[in-house]
Amino acid sequence: MGMIDLRALQAAVRSWLQENIPNDAVLPRRNEDLTPEMEEWIRAIRRDFGSRGWLAPRWPTYYGGGGFPPEAADVIEEEMRRHRMPPFDLNNPFLVALRVWGTEEQKARWLTPTLRGEITVCQIQSEPSTGSDLASQETTAIKDGDEYVVNGEKGYIANQLTPDYACILVTTDPDGPKYENLSMAILRTKGTGITVKKRQMIIGRSQRSFVIDNVRLPIEDVIGGEGNGWEVSQTLLDVERGGWGVTLAQSKQIEISEREYWLNK
C-alpha cells in the first residue's frame, strides 16, 4: 500500500459514519439485550464497514483486513470511537489463536469472513459445571469416522451479538492424561442439536450458554490438531490478559509463512 492521504481517509470514514449512523440514531446500551431488528441493523453496518477493510484496518488484506499502516489505522479507529460505533465483538483472542494455530483453509473459513464482518465468532472455554478449572472439560467430542460427536454445555458468554460460531474447548479423549486429552474446535451455534439457554445478569443483559446434543463436527473443524487444545487455550488466555499470544520471533515466522503461501497462490 502506497502513501495514504490521512485527511482524505478521515473524511471518507467520517462521511460514511454520518450517513449510516446518524447522530440521532438510537444505539444499544451495553447493559441491554439486542432486539432482532437492532441485531440485524448492526450486522448490516458491520458487513458494509468490513467490506472496506475498516473493521480490521491493521490486519493484512489477504485475510480481509485493510492492510493499513499504523497511522492510518489510528485514524479509522479514532473516528469509530468518536462516532459511538455499535458493538462489533471482533473477539481478538480468537482471531489471534486462529492465526497462530489454524491452517490456511481454516483461516479462509473463519478468519477472513470475521474480519470482513460477514460472521461473528465467540470463544467459550468455560462450562457451567466446571468453574475456572479449564482442564476439566465435561463437554466431549468423540471421534466417529471422519467426524466427532459433541455433547455437553458451554457457557456463559455475554456477547450482545448472537455468535454464528463458537470456539470451544472439549475433551476428545476421556481416558487420556489431563491437558493432553483436550482439543479446540469451531462449532456452529445454530441448527439441529443446539439449544441456547439464557440467564439474566444484574446489569440487565443476558448471558448465554449452549447445550450441545449429539452434534456432528468434521475433523477439519479442530484447531491445532487433536490433543493440542490446552496449548491453543493458553494463546487465547494470553491475549485476553493483554499479551500477544506469541513471541515476537513466532509472530515474524507466522507472517513469513503467510506471505509465502499467498505469493504462491
Image (cartoon, helix red, strand yellow):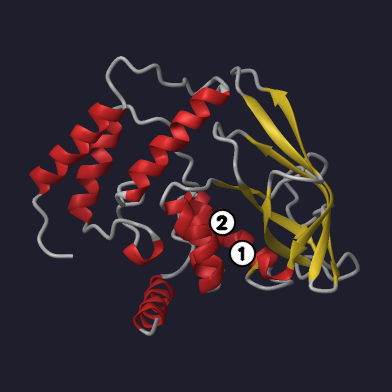
Q: In the depicted view, which residue is nearer to us: 112 or 127?
A: 112
Residue 230, placed above or below residue 28: below
Determine which of the numbered discs, if any, sits on residue 232 in the image: 1
Q: Decide if residue 217 is on the left or right side of residue 94.
A: right
Q: Decide if residue 230 is on the left or right side of residue 55.
A: right
Circle 2/circle 1 CB separation < 8 Å:
yes
Determine which of the numbered discs, if any, sits on residue 8 in the image: none
Residue 167 position in % (x across, y down): 64, 54
Q: Amino acid at mark 1?
A: Val
The quadrant the C terminus occupies is bottom left
Residue 243, placed above or below residue 24: below
Residue for point 40% across, 76% down:
258
The quarter holding residue 215 reads: bottom right
The quarter holding residue 16 reads: top left
Q: List the residue tagged with mark 2.
A: 236
Residue for point 66% across, 22% down:
201
Residue for point 44% across, 70% down:
247
Q: Secondary structure at mark 1?
A: helix
Q: Decide if residue 248 is on the left or right side of residue 101.
A: left
Whole-number angstrom distance, CA of label 2 to CA of label 1 = 7 Å
